[in-house]
Amino acid sequence: MKATDYIALALNEHKVSCVFELVGGMITHLVDSFYRNGNIRIVSVHHEQAAAFAADASGRMMGVPGVALATSGPGATNLLTGIGSCYFDSSPAIFITGQVNRSEIKGDRAIRQLGFQETDIVSMAQPITKATWQVRESGDIPVMLQRAFDLATSGRPGPVLLDIPMDVQRGDITQADIAAAAAAAAKTTSPIVSSAQIEEMLVAIREAKRPLILVGGGIRSAQACDLVREFIDLVNVPVVNSLMGVDVLPYSHRLRVGMIGSYGNRWANLAIGQSDFLLVLGSRLDIRQTGSETAAFKGARTIYHVDCEPGEINNRVIGCVPIVADLKQFLATAIGVAREPSQRFTERTEWLGEIATLRNAWPDTAEAANMPGINPNVFLHQLSAASTSASAYAIDVGQHQMWAGQSIEVQPDQRFLTSGGMGSMGFSLPAAIGAACVAAPRPVVVVAGDGGFQCNIQELQTVARNRLPIKIVILNNRCHGMVRQFQQSYFDERYQSTLWGYNAPDYAKVAVAYGLPGHTVSQEADVPAALQWLWEKPDEPALLQVMVDTFINAYPKIAFGKPITEMEPFSKPIEMEGT
């Protein structure tokens, strides 16, 4: 069997339903084999970064590694931002790059390049992958591909890259090679979770007066969402979430509090400050969650921190009780212990009432109430009410990302996809393409800013060509809003490159140029009719441009150098933030 024919067959057997690519000379054998196989959809995009982001999103949605292909040289290097996104956000993905023939690889020669477009992508990608290999013999492909799938999905998920020279792609795979791959399939084991440690943790929960559970992106990465919902209902503890954990609990869940962090819901940050116990599940406790003052975040409260990577525990926030475990196994064991007749978890009516009081005192919709025009937080609640049929929200990076984390009303079966660790503008549109391809026929909603949307605007053609049911919403404030807000705080309102020297097109007209319906709304009173227009044809793409004030800020925001409970604009930072 030809090597690339085997790759197509193997990906199909691993339940990969589509691959994302921008064609180039060094992947023509791969593309042809996928085409002739016919069981895997080939989605051609217009920039390799978009292919990588699409693979990222499809991997998150399905738990099966997303797959992107790229040719050698610029094709491979263009994948790197998306590969990094997968690595930092724990998305299972496999990237396959074409490479020049083995005879054209420079090896140890004291030259920069031998073959045309020859580039050492293996060395470049190593720091942001779980593994990166160049395949030297065709017969090695079955074993290496099996190892790639095992590694991408085991432990903390992430990306694996295979770089395959052109002549290796043309080589033969034997039945013995295929048999070796079956024998090489990993038998993964997880650390044993101690029932005694879980019982100790449950005692601490029962004794706490104001306990909280913090859920992060690791819940979805571990495919443990159903388990964590069951556990939360058992122990009756209110839940806060990180930006990457917005979709762990549905918005309407009785124990959901809200998003914490640098731009978290004000009441959720205040609840953290009042809590006496915190159980952290699948969250790194990075600076965007805790603020810079880690000692204040820890305070006198007891923190149990569960993570599959020991290095993430007691990394920034010191003094946590560590539980190194796969979240799925931990939660299954914890549920079993919590269901024992001796375990009793009472309703925390008083504590929930205190949180409700905080929420009523500091609603998200009031943070920008004094600004003219459409209020982004109010709009995102309206968008949520209109978008209950969507499978996912794909959120870009910027102020709108914070507003979305604060105000999107995620339904029980919806996903919230955004670029967290990499924080890459341009993520949302290609991510929506990846999500739409694996969640069909359900639509996907994009929420983007005018600045970030231009980074991968070319993928409107991919949406139009494939008639993907993607509802694109662009919050247009005519600037790079998050950095403009930073300049307002720290650079005496010198808005170079965010407002001065920046502009954006009329996106409604751009949509029409790509053959998509486009519409603009600029008045609050017109929003209901605009959302009705957006969803008039649920299975068709459409773009809605929402004009918001240029100088609206994303609040609340932790005042840098102060505890999580002290937030702008009422509290001022004591130093310039470094992140």
Image (cartoon, helix red, strand yellow):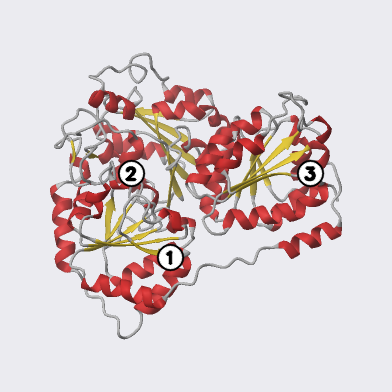
Task: Report, in whole angstroms, how far the alpha carbon at label 3 lies from the one at label 2.
Answer: 42 Å
Name the residue carrying label 1: 226
Task: Report, in whole angstroms, how far the alpha carbon at label 2 lies from the one at label 1.
Answer: 28 Å
Name the residue carrying label 3: 136
Q: In front: 548, or 443? A: 548
Q: Is residue 429 above or below residue 184?
A: above
- 551 displayed left or right of 6: left
Image mark for residue 287: 2
Given the image, on which type of amino acid does mark 1 rest? Asp
Earlier in the chain: of badge 2 and badge 1, it is 1
- Is there any visible trace of residue 468 in the rendered image? no
- 507 displayed left or right of 262: right
Marks 2,1: beta carbons within 8 A: no
Q: Position of residue 552 (x, y in %)?
A: 24, 29
Task: Report, in whole angstroms, how far the alpha carbon at label 1 lies from the one at label 3.
Answer: 42 Å
Marks 3,2: beta carbons within 8 A: no
